[in-house]
Structures are given as structure tokens and as C-alpha cells.
Amino acid sequence: LIGITCVAMNLLLCSSGVYYMDTIADSLQGGGTVILNDSGAASFDPQLIAPNEELTIVVDGVQGRFRTTNWYITAAVTLLSGILAYFVSGRALKPLRSFTSQVEQVQLNNLADMRIDEDSISEFRQLSRSFNQMLERLNNAFSAQRHAAHELRTPLALMQAQLELFSAEHPDMRPEMAEFLTLLREQTERLTQMTKTLLEMSNLQQVARNEQLQVAPMVEEIFTDLAPLAEKRSITLEAEGDAALTGSDALIYRMLFNLTENAVKYNRLGGSVRVELAQGQEKCIIRVSDTGCGIPEEYQRSIFHPFFRVDKSRSREYGGAGLGLSLVWEIADLH
């Protein structure tokens, strides 16, 4: 902006100066000759002027020198003002950089302890105060969420225990009563798993992710855990390759387990599930594929949203709550 202003000023000055140089001859009356050379010196001898002789001014190269000098001045002014503006703006933005560095330190696990110093940055005092209030509200909201999830676990555990006890004490109950109790147990277990997953999702940020992991042994362990379910549906489990990454062993295991379990549950009978691992440049590539019916294109982004299910009837059949892939997405995003 400074450069454009200086150039525009120079062009106007040049235009004005040249215009007035060209009109000097028309402004002077009399006789004689004035010669103005490149150095700006003028030669003029009034004795040589004859009576009633017209005065003539000959400008020799002064217009070009005038333009050149103006451009030099413009360049110097632009450079000096640009340097000055750089240091002034840098000083003016220093509080903003300080504020940004403090904001970048805010994480989910330090909301209660993290506060922006309201006095050290006077220019952003009101903004710092508002930001601190926002952090406090967020911390209260997350605390309430975790507390609610914890509170749900106790009554659900009691309900499960009472249902199991009632079933054990009444082995000769009527078939419709037994079916009703089985349904209650399944739904209570589903609520318990949902609560557990919600708690895990709310605490993801607090899990350390600095372990060196080999993924292939983890996949073999997952295959062992899922073997009974795979055998029940005649599903073949296959693994290929290996990869290493830095992260949380528990979270990566849960991510792979959820993906592989989904691939087994929603596969066709007698199908297969394949887990391919590869080490890319600065990344680990994990591909889980199956021979199931697939997911319609319009749902392929929605399946990672919490509680979203493509086929609600099949999800209820397998006890799904619509949180498995949402947790997978969060874990992958964290890593």
C-alpha cells in the first residue's frame, strides 16, 4: 500500500512538473533566449535582447532528469517507510502472537488448569477474559458429560445383576417371561456398552500416544479374539504385511478391533475379512476389507457420525449402538 501510494504520488508530481516546464515559455513575455541544460544551469544575457523581441526558453534534458530524480526519491521513501511499517506492525502484532501461543497450549485434558493471563496482554484483556470464560464453560460441560456417564454405569450394573439373579432363581418361568427377561438383559447390556463407549470417547484426549507399536501382532491378537464369532459365521480371517507407528496401544487396538468386528458381523455367511498393512512415507497404511454387501455411497460419510446406522434392524440384531465407527474416526484423527 505504501509502495502504490508513493508511485502514484511520483507520477502526479512528474506530470505536474513537466506540465509547468512546458508552460514556462508561454508564461514569460519579452525577448531573448534562455538555455536550461542537464545540470540545471541557465545561460541568459539580457543585453542580447532586442526591443520587442520575444523571450524563448530552451529546456535541454531537464524533464528527463526531473523524472529520474523523482523516481530515486520515490524508491528511497518507499523503502524507508516499508522498513518502518514492518517494525511498527511487528511490534503491534506481538501481543497477538503471544495470545496465539497461549491458545495453542489449550487441550481437553488441561481445560481446568489452562487460563490466559489477562494482565500481561493489555490490548487483548477483554478477549482474554472472554476466552477464559469459554474455557470454564467447556470444562464444566465435559465434566458434566463424564459425570453423567459414570452415574449411568452404576444403575445399569445393578439392573444387570438383578436380571441375572431373577433368571437364576426362577429357572421354570414361562417361555414368554423368559423371552422378556432375555430382551431386557440384551438391551441393558447394549446400554452398558454405549455408556462405556461414550466414556472412552470423552477421555480420548487424555490417553498418552507415545508408544512404539508393531501392528501385525496386534492384528493376530484381534483375529484370536474374534475367532469364535468368525467360526460361527464361517468367515475366513486373513492378514498381510506389517507396519509400525507411534501411538496408544489400547486405542489402536480398539480401532482395529471395531473395524474387523464390523467386517465379520455384517459380512455374508462364508465370506472373508482381509487386513492389509503397509508402511508408507511418514505414515502407516491399514486397510480392512470384507466380502459383505458394502455401504451405499450416500451413507459412506455419515457412518462415522455418532449413533448413525445404515440398517437399524441389523444393528439391533448384533447389539450395535452406532458408536463403533465414530470411535474409530476419533482414534484415527488423534493419531
Image: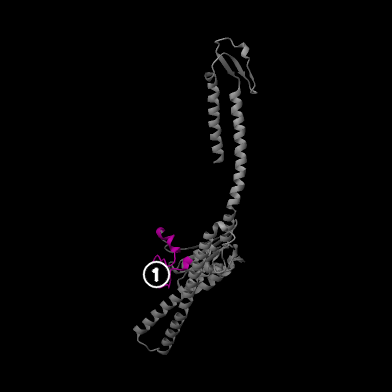
Q: Is residue 57 left or right of residue 184?
A: right
Position of the C terminus, as image quadrant, is bottom right
In this view, 165 is above or below 8: below
* Residue 219 appears in the picture as rendered: no
Q: Is residue 51 left or right of residue 230?
A: right
Residue 264 percent coordinates (x, y): 47, 68
**Circle 1 residue:** 314
* Residue 192 appears in the picture as rendered: yes
| Amino acid at circle 1 | Arg
| Picture quadrant of residue 102 | bottom right
Q: Write down the region rendered in magenta.
A: 297-326
Residue 133 percent coordinates (x, y): 51, 65
- The number of callouts visible is 1
| Picture quadrant of residue 2 | top right
Of residues 225 and 23, the one nearer the viewer is 23
**Which residue: 42% across, 78% down?**
188
Name the secondary structure under disc 1: helix
The 10 Å Cα crowd at callout 1, few under 14, some 14 to 19, many 20 or more, is: few
Position of the N terminus, as image quadrant, is top right
Q: Is residue 125 magenta?
A: no
Residue 64 percent coordinates (x, y): 59, 25
